[in-house]
């Protein structure tokens, strides 16, 4: 998606047009003649993001100077919104691909980079590779922590971009960076306790080579997470603006820098770098992320015209972002914890099933990345259409994005059902593990369609600015997987098939429930509020009003 800087600037400079009705118009109003109000003048976005309420008052009509005895109706509203620009001027399907495709590419690029880190960790020795695998959960949690404010930034920037308020976009990103600094400070505060608690939770024996390597890596990961927190916020701003192609370019540069630095710092290459072992991977990635944050900052000014200037932290503004991002991140944390519990349930049916689950998830990784791309694209499109003041088009953007993601998942579902085991065998695992992975993939292949529905509707919730239902439905269904898995596997005598049946059934439930709630409750309420505003004529129309309400 492309929202030109010039378009944003012209929208933000648009004056607040509230024409005072002429005397003949006031005479007609007293006689009960209907005035014309600008379309799309809902205050829905302001209420969704909990900003100031509309100050009321009809936009009025421009009346001619003809005598009052000859009323001349007008059909031109005084504050008609400008035509949509950028991706809002595209079809919903084209816009979803424009925004989502670079996001998918970034996900695949980062996944490939993680494999290179694993390769170099293996070169250090089996203990270091094991430690890196143990810390995969910690890496995910740090990324989730950095995403809390970033998710809120994307939601608010997309709405402001739709409203055409360039100056408010800049202020939002600056406050997002303050929020990133707060996230980093909080992680530093708890960092002395994390390594020991983390190792204990995973059952890693203290004093072993894997434990020591993992502890050093985790300490370096947390200490160097400032760049990741800042770059997450800045990348989210690009997503909100729809300039994901620019974000992809910066990500390519960042990954390239990390791919060079990591092995040099891990192995102490050429004698010019210290040999840091596994911690070198975290240090190299931290340096690359910090450089990436600088590149994102520069690109935001050069390609989007969004100039970031110092402003004092605004706790209220930062909290609005946290309220959007925290439920989503919490839902991801719950899912990860439940996945560990489900791994134990699978292991109870045979350790090869636990290994098969991990191998199967590696095979599914590409499908997950595609869903993530459509999720973030939907968040941008829904947020921008609501910022523009058109809830109907926001609903359409979600529906089209969801349908496209489901269609994209269909080939994956067929391939994994019939050929998943063959693909898993390419990883060179034990035949029993490969067979277990095949069983896992056959069970979960059809669930990918509902994963697509769930992922995209989560993006729609983000665009609306209300992610609490994501946590409510997601946590309930995910937690329910554990007792259901044990009940079916042991009490029902289904064995490993009971574990996978629990996973699939709850995935279906999550997709259906979240989609139903968004369509039937969230969007319906927004549309009803918009319609009520139009009927009452009490909302102030026009792009200038929407931009002010979101500022």
Image: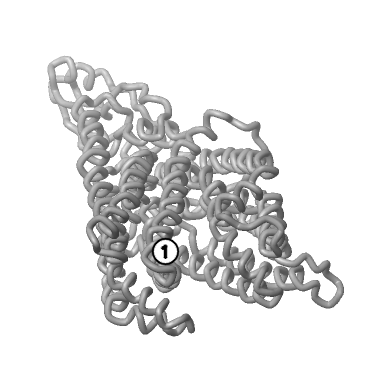
Work out whether 204 lies above or below 120: above
* Residue 421 picture location, percent across and down: 35, 80
- Residue drawn where x is 42% and y is 60% of the image: 343
Secondary structure found at label 1: helix
Q: Quadrant of the N terminus?
A: bottom left
- Asked whether the viewer can see residue 340, the reply is yes
Which residue is tagged 1? Answer: 347
* Residue 486 picture location, percent across and down: 31, 54
Foreground of the two, 9 or 150: 150
Q: Is residue 365 left or right of residue 62?
A: right
Work out whether 265 lies above or below 377: below
- Residue drawn where x is 71% and y is 50% of the image: 223
Foreground of the two, 149 or 24: 149
* Residue 544 picture location, percent across and down: 41, 35
- Residue drawn where x is 44% and y is 68% of the image: 351
The crowd level at tag 1 (other Cα within 10 Å; few <14, some 14-19, many 20+) is some
Q: Is residue 293 left or right of residue 167?
A: right
Residue 352 placement: quadrant: bottom left
Task: Name the colour scheme.
Answer: one colour
Work out whether 406 lies above or below 160: below
All told, the count of numbered labels is: 1
């Amino acid at each position: 998606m492309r929202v030109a800087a010039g378009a944003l600037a012209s929208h933000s400079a648009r004056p607040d047009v509230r024409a005072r009705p002429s005397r003949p118009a006031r005479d007609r109003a007293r006689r009960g003649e209907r005035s014309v109000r600008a379309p799309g003048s809902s205050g829905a976005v302001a209420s969704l993001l909990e900003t100031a309420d509309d100050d009321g008052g009809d936009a009025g009509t421009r009346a001619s100077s003809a005598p009052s005895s000859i009323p001349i109706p007008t059909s031109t509203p005084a504050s008609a919104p400008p035509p949509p620009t950028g991706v809002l001027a595209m079809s919903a399907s084209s816009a979803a691909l424009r925004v989502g495709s670079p996001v998918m590419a970034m996900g695949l690029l980062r996944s490939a980079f993680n494999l290179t880190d694993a390769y170099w960790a293996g070169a250090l020795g089996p203990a270091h590779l094991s430690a890196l695998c143990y810390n995969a959960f910690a890496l995910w949690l740090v990324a989730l922590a950095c995403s809390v404010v970033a998710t809120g930034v994307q939601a608010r920037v997309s709405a402001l971009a739709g409203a055409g308020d360039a100056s408010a976009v800049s202020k939002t990103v600056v406050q997002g960076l303050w929020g990133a600094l707060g996230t980093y400070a909080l992680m530093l505060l708890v960092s002395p306790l994390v390594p020991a608690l983390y190792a204990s939770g995973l059952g890693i024996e203290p004093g072993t080579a894997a434990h020591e390597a993992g502890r050093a890596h985790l300490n370096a990961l947390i200490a160097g997470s400032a760049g990741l927190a800042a770059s997450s916020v800045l990348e989210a701003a690009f997503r909100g603006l729809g300039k994901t192609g620019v974000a992809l370019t910066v990500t390519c540069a960042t990954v390239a820098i990390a791919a060079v630095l990591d092995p040099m710092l891990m192995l102490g290459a050429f004698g010019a770098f210290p040999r840091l072992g596994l911690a070198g991977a975290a240090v190299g990635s931290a340096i690359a992320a910090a450089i990436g944050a600088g590149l994102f900052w520069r690109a935001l000014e050069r390609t989007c015209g969004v100039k970031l200037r110092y402003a004092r932290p605004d706790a209220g503004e930062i909290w609005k972002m946290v309220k959007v991002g925290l439920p989503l991140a919490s839902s991801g944390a719950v899912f990860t914890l439940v996945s560990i519990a489900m791994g134990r349930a699978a292991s109870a049916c045979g350790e090869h099933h636990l290994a098969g689950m991990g191998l199967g998830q590696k095979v599914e990784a590409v499908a997950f990345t595609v869903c993530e791309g459509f999720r973030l694209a939907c968040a941008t499109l829904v947020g921008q259409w609501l910022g523009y003041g058109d809830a109907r088009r926001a609903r359409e953007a979600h529906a089209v994005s969801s349908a496209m993601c489901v269609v994209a998942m269909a080939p994956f579902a067929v391939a994994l059902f019939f050929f998943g085991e063959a693909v898993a065998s390419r990883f060179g695992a034990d035949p029993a593990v490969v067979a277990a992975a095949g069983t896992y993939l056959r069970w979960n292949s059809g669930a990918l369609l509902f994963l697509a529905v769930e992922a995209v509707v989560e993006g729609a919730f983000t665009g609306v600015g209300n992610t609490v239902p994501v946590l409510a439905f997601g946590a309930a269904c995910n937690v329910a997987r554990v007792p259901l898995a044990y009940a079916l596997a042991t009490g029902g005598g289904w064995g490993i098939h009971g574990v996978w049946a629990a996973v699939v059934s709850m995935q279906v439930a999550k997709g259906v429930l979240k989609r139903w709630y968004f369509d039937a409750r969230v969007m319906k309420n927004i549309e009803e509020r918009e319609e009520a505003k139009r009927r009452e004529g009490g909302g102030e129309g026009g792009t200038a009003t929407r931009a002010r309400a979101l500022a």
